[in-house]
Image (cartoon, rainbow, N blue to C red):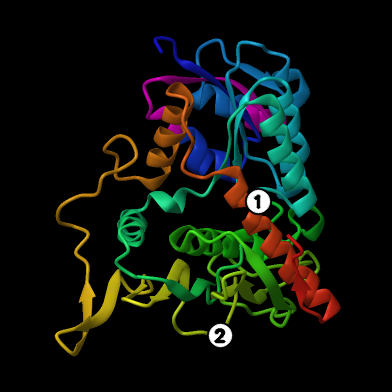
Amino acid sequence: MDKKLRIGIIGCGGIANGKHMPSLKELDNVEMVAFCDIIEERAVKAAEKFGTEDARVYTDYKELLKDETIDVCHVCTPNRSHGFITVDALEAGKHVMCEKPMAKTYADAKAMLEAARRTGKKLTIGYQNRQNNENLYVKAACEAGDLGEVYFAKAHAIRRRAVPTWGVFLNEYEQGGGPLIDIGTHALDLTLWMMNNYKPKMVVGNTFRKLAEDKETANAWGDWDPKEFTVEDAAFGYIVMENGAVVELESSWALNDRHPREATYTLCGTKAGVDTVDGLWFNSVKHNRQVAEKVNLDAGGVAFYAGKSEKASVRDMQQWIDAIVNDHDPCVLPEQALCVTRILEAIYTSAKTGKPVYFDD
């Protein structure tokens, strides 16, 4: 493919500026030609910093989608609008990368998947942590059978005092929840990906809002406003898969835990175990002795999906664009992201009803 892929950015806030646009800027075979935000000034600044000389600016994403020369859209808006914007973009003939989580609700996420299948356009979700060195290494080990059957796992997304106080993170209407849907989604995605298990049978969970009313918070980004804090500050889930495997999911922006850990996991298999809490460790039995081995990720290399960048976010964009150019599946399949959203929603439902949630299919 000789021509550069033309990309439109929908939502020019924090995640677009922090991940999507600077990462895309490092690729030679793409150009950002359109920028949309409900706050026009943000779209203008994005266009000036990342766009082509003739980049266009919009405040209505539907106007951007009318441009038939745009090949790809990146949806970087609050969770509530992921679903309908993505569906509209796919229907307009664009390939779509949507920021995580896939959607606020399972119904919205399912509509996104159905639109991708109906239009034949590619859809992926921004779970860039899959492209970290340690996660690529563990995935290779899982695929090689080094762990055997993974039947117990923990997905960790714990912050001690790091509540995001900007944007709409604390707004339940816009986001659908707090740390569970924000950072818990990364940990769960990684865990299910390593297990290659996307068939949940039952979920039980609970959410807490125990620290949201605190005034002296020692928060990393300054004290939060309790009046604006309309989501949980912690959530926990217990997930049973169809084959009997169990996953425990823990998530919090503010928990009195001395050992914060985020986008990490523990895997326990019949041959060995892995955890990424304090580096990458494999544990097993060798020659009738218990062995724990720490992997040196500074030496050697991993067969990356595309390119040689050490930035996970750039690798993520590389493999995504490569999937479009060479017409193959991206790393994150929409069916996988749909399962993550379904489980997260089930945890919230279980917390509200006080009952387990069972899946019929």
> For this rendering, which residue is in front, 320 or 271?
271
> For this rendering, which residue is in front, 36 or 188?
188
What residue is at 29 percent from the left and 34 percent from the top? 307
What residue is at 69 percent from the left and 73 percent from the top? 203
Q: Which residue is mark 1?
A: 338
Element type at marker 1? helix
> For this rendering, which residue is in front, 256 or 24?
24
Measuring from the top left, give residue 323's x and y in whole percent: 45, 30
On-image quarter of the C terminus: bottom right
Q: Give the mark nearer the N terminus: 1 vs 2.
A: 2
How busy is the neighbourhood of tag 2: few (under 14 within 10 Å), some, or many (20 plus)?
Answer: few
In magenta segment, residue 27 = yes
Q: Which residues are magenta?
A: 23-43
Report the side of 260 relative to 105 (left or right): left
CB atoms at circles 1 and 2 under 8 Å apart? no
The circle on residue 185 is none
In magenta segment, residue 144 = no
Measuring from the top left, give residue 282's x and y in whole percent: 28, 74
On-image quarter of the N terminus: top left
Say if residue 182 shows up in the picture: yes
Measuring from the top left, give residue 115's x and y in whole percent: 72, 33
Q: CA distance from mark 1 to mark 2?
A: 31 Å
Q: Which residue is mark 2?
A: 256
What residue is at 79 percent from the left and 66 percent from the top? 230
Callout 2, which amino acid? Asn
Eyeballing the image, is 199 above or below 246?
above
Eyeballing the image, is 66 above or below 164?
above
Element type at marker 2? loop
